[in-house]
Amino acid sequence: MRPTRVDGNLVWDTLNGLTAFILPAPDSYSVSQGISTREPGGIDAGITGLLMTTFRLTQPFSTSESPAPEAAADLLNKVAEKINPTAVGLFASPFACLSFSEKVAVFALLEQHFFCTRPHELAALRLLVQSEQNRATVRRQRWFTWQHSEVW
């Protein structure tokens, strides 16, 4: 049974699924979606934590809305359940359990129904879109960082 509310673990699970979608690697989220690589990816680089921090920093000062990370996770998971209501896997997050092509369908549906979302979901969606647009830049930066890192 899936969680009925957005909790911290579900948010991290969802954002890990998003990170694997943007920058796949050999991690369990990437493998689960059916697209993975041998090289380190977004989860290895800590992108999920950066997304969480960025969401929190861009949060409007209104206390009447869900915090931005929770709103983004809730939106992705609700749309994921519309795309594949029976998606199951290693994760509590419906979005994280989707295949790569189903995740593409989530964003296609969001794009089609852009004006039906609530303002705080729009803010979260804007950040997600900006993240996708910066994908190539992140890949170049990731390569440079890993080439000059003592860890790798």
Image: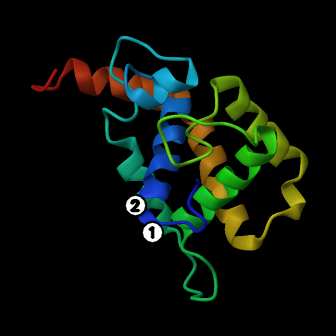
What residue would you read off at disc 1?
57
- The structure residue drawn at horizontal position 37% and vertical position 35%, both measured from the top left corner, is 43
Mark 2 crowdedness (10 Å alpha carbons): few <14, some 14-19, many ≥20: some
Name the spot of residue 14 as percent of width and height, x first. 53, 48
- Asked if the residues shown at circle 2 and circle 1 are in contact, with their CB atoms under 8 angstroms apart, the answer is yes
Name the spot of residue 106 as percent of width and height, x first. 75, 40
Q: Is residue 61 left or right of residue 150?
A: right
Relative to residue 91, is residue 21 depicted above or below? above
Name the spot of residue 93 as percent of width and height, x first. 55, 48
**Viewer-closest of 85 and 17:** 85
Relative to residue 71, is residue 36 depicted above or below? above
- The structure residue drawn at horizontal position 47% and vertical position 17%, both measured from the top left corner, is 36
- The amino acid at mark 1 is Leu
- The structure residue drawn at horizontal position 72% and vertical position 39%, both measured from the top left corner, is 86
Q: Is residue 43 left or right of residue 88?
A: left
What residue would you read off at disc 2?
53
Residue at the outermost bottom position: 63
Instruction: Identify the element where label 2 is drawn.
Output: helix
CA gap, disc 2 to disc 1? 6 Å
